[in-house]
Image (spheres, rainbow, N blue to C red):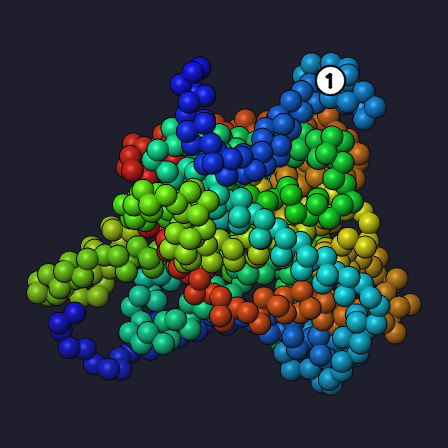
Amino acid sequence: MKGMFNELSRNKWYYLMALPGLLYFLVFCYLPLPGILIAFKDYNFKDGIFGSRWVGLQNFAFYFQGDYAWRTTFNTLFINANYIIFGTIIAVAFAILLNEIRKSFFRRMYQSLMFLPYFFSAIVVGNFVYLMFSSKFGLFNQLRSLIDQAPIDWYSAPGYWVSILVGVYIWKNTGYAVILYLATIIGIDNELYEAAALDGANRWQNIRYITLPLLVPTITIVTLLAVGKIFYGDFQTIYSIVGDNGLLYETTDVIDTYVFRAVKNVGDISMPAAVGLYQSVCGFLFVLGCNWAVKKINNDNALF
Amino acid sequence: MSIRKPRYSISQAILHAVAIAFCAFTTIPFVLTIMVSISGESSVIKNGYSIFPENFSLNAYRLIFSGDEIWKGYMVSITVTAIGTGLGLLLSAMLANTMARQKVKYRNGIALFIFITMIFSAGLVPWYIFVTKYLHLKDTLAALILPMLINPFHVFLIRNYFKSLPQALIESAEMEGAGPFYVFMKIMLPLSTPIIATVALFYSLAYWNDWGLALWLIDNRELYPLQFILFKIQSMINYMSTQGNLVSGNQALPTETAQMAMVLVTIGPIILVYPFIQRYFVKGIMIGAVKG
């Protein structure tokens, strides 16, 4: 105890400088934690978190007994898995492709144009999607009419939307990921390629036997970090695109959009709190699992 | 590489073609938005959204700038972005500074305290109840700033950068009698401009583009940020289009083109600064990739 006071007074200015930041985390991340109790209660605003009646696991039962638990969980995992798989493949391919382009002017220009969508808000993205897929005025139905195909009423056809969402993800995030992978490629020791050239290796062999293997650690880390967040749906993008259009829920309703609707449109508090807790706990277990996996592969890259 | 290569080759041409195709994919929605926003509403109704509109008109811009909603939206967005970025950056850097100093004994405890928030959260509902019922942030400007003030990821990014600075320099300054605040302001920050600039830009972008906080916490129209105004317009138009016939009674208003004009109004500032700032983002991502 005495040692603690000594330390606090010796470095008091450092602790004071950290204090406002620590207060932020205390208030916005730790103080809401007791609110987890809401998941086990029949919450009403008047009695508050501690005064409301206990209901045991009833809120969880409501969610898990309906069709929603399976549907929202499946959609969340399925959409995120597709994001990870296709997002990674495309980004690695373009990072290698850009690296092969010899004129640096063009390389930089392509990189800039690919990176641009990263700067648009989810609302703007939702708007772009509407430009493409609006059944009356959209670009896709215009293209279909050019080749004599009947227009599709996209916004009432749930079957297309996972592909569309993945397309949007690739559109928005490839630029960012390309920069990440290019940073690794640029860091590869040039001597490796020179040695390979002496042995008569061609471009494909360089990519296949040098670039790709050396990219694997970065790919693994990026992927595992994404897998750690797989229980969290892409709320802002999905809600901006799908909104309250119930016709598309079948394939696009994720845990986060479900929770939002339950609170904001239905006015329910306790059941969504239970769903949120289920999501937090599953998400936490996934992070631990992924970190364990990272540690097995390369201890330096583990988060903790 | 030592081997000579032809200046022009088929393989280079293919690479360029693929890259150009992908760049077209990333930029076409943006170009289309510009073109629709300056086309006549009748052209859109007749031919759909088109990169080559039949007639031009600035009616959409006249319509959206006729009220004062957009100006208020700009004021809210600019205020939130400026205060949020400034305050968030300052607190993040101070926190990182403490965590980076070897002699601070509890630095790892502080890091753990922050790290836990990255991997476990109470969930949205407890957060929402706490922020509205106990902090009474609903319908305040602070509701758009405080809940996302510090991004823990960026705190660690700054800390790692601080740690990589020459410690001998800091120690010698302290030996000369410089206090922690002096060292922070005059040595740490000036030596770390690349990472500080990057984090500042990431914070600004996050604040400028955010609408989730408004969605949860703002009902008062006076406090709508730009993005949220766009969201409201968009959901209203989507709603009308699902109602089919309702739209025809309203055809005098250029709703389709106005929506696109509104999109440009919200992304305009970003597009204007993009050519100048994007290299800082690239640098930041690379620092994160190498050190993170």
Q: Residue furthest right?
A: B249
In the image, residue A61 lies at what x, y percent?
68, 20
The residue under the point 42% across, 73% down is A109
**Camera sees residue A180:** no
The type of residue carrying mark 1 is Phe
Q: Quadrant of the C terminus of chain B?
A: top left
Residue in the picture at 72% in, 71% down: B261
Give SS at disc 1. Answer: helix
Assign the N terminus of chain B to one quadrant of the image.
bottom left
Q: Is residue A278 left or right of residue A247?
A: left
Q: Residue at x 55, y 53 (%)?
A: B203
Q: Is residue A13 above or below residue B227?
A: above
* Residue at image coords 82%, 66%: B68
The quadrant in which residue A269 appears is top right
Image height check: is B112 above or below A210? Answer: above
Residue B197 placement (x, y as % from top left): 47, 58
Residue farthest along the front direction in this orientation: B177
Count of marks placed on residues: 1
Q: Residue furthest bottom?
A: B55
Quarter-wise, where is residue B70 in the image?
Answer: bottom right
In front: B247, or A31? A31
Q: Position of residue B175 (x, y in %)?
A: 31, 42
Taking depth in this image into account, of B84 and B103 the one nearest to the observer is: B103
The chain under label 1 reads A
Which residue position holds label 1? A50
